[in-house]
Amino acid sequence: MKKALITGVNGMDGSHLADLLLTKGYRVYGMERRLSVPNRENSGHLVDHPQFTFVSGDLTDQNSLCRLINDIEPDEVYNLAAQSFVGVSWTIPTTTSDVNGLGCLRLLEAIREYQDKNNKKIKFYQAATSEMFGKMVENPANENTPFYPRSPYGVAKLYAYWITKNYRESYDMFACSGILFNHESERRGLEFVTRKITDGVVRIKMGLEDSISLGNLDSMRDWGYAPDYVEGMWMMLQQDEPDDYVLATNHSYSIRDFLDLAFNEVGISDWEPYVKQDPRFYRPAEVDVLCGDYSKAKEVLGWQPKVSLAEMVKIMILHDKERLGCE
């Protein structure tokens, strides 16, 4: 039975990946920080699964990572833990850099030390991001497009991308980065714009709120559905040779397009009276357009997105209706 360690298991991607690996017969270990009350909103259903175990660790604590790698002896490690909110990265740039950048290095070092002592290879996946492209110099972006990050989050993730590539080439490690464009699901946190919209739309429909406050409505993003994307992560580690891959849909849509779809799901055709633009939600350096080319992933991995943006919005609205008790 294969063993996998997932950092950030309580997040959207981490919980979806755990679900996928368990269906494939893995023994899964989900890393979470030691908190008095862990946030298991996305992962609570895993508690009683006989092949799943929560373990304590922290990307800022080298010793905890070494201990986990030595105790678990995983076949695969998926590094999904992060300070994941781009907007907050300007407020806490040092913490963002420590967790998202150096955290990856600490985990790679723990794996390298284990491999040197035990002569056993561990496959490693690093969650890279389209935010590394930032001010895009090529549209759509692929694996060879130059990077131009526009946030402390993007810069930290770019360090993690390059240190992963360096460890692969320097130590012959099986280490991959998945450069994933925006992907969402009903498990996305309420502070993220897509979930803020679907939650707000349902509250407006129920009469609980009268508006949603957002930032730049003209930002364009390449949105996919998270369960499709975690399958791509797994596919990367099943290859004979490690490499980096873009996962995307090859299409980009604006926040306005997302609002159209979400409000239409609850029968509201004119959403403008319900949406306020608030300068607080603008970024210091805006990323206007993100769009990715997944041709390499399709050709090498056989991966492609399955769920459309409209289908994803429908899933998210339905979830929020059920959660809030909307008829």
Image: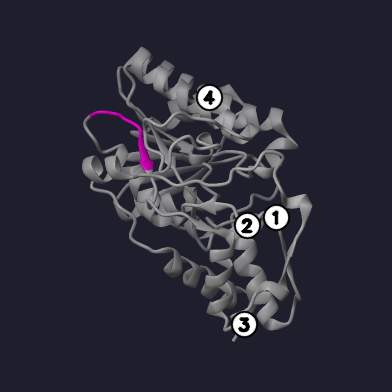
Whole-angstrom CA distance, mark 1 to mark 2, is: 9 Å
Q: Which residue is mark 4?
A: 159
- Residue 145 seen anywhere in this rendered image of the structure: yes
- Element at badge 3? loop
Mark 2 Cα within 10 Å, few/some/many (few <14, many 20+)?
A: some
Q: Is residue 229 above or below residue 72?
A: below
Whether residues under marks 1 and 2 lie with C-beta atoms below 8 angstroms apart, the answer is yes
Q: Which mark is residue 326?
A: 3
Residue 66, image x, y percentages: 50, 23
Whole-angstrom CA distance, mark 4 to mark 1, is: 28 Å
Residue that appears at 26% across and 46% down: 298
| Disc with the residue nearer the chain's start (1 vs 2) | 2
Q: Is residue 242 shown in magenta?
A: yes
- Element at badge 1? loop
Majority secondary structure of magenta residues: loop
Q: Which residues are magenta?
A: 241-246
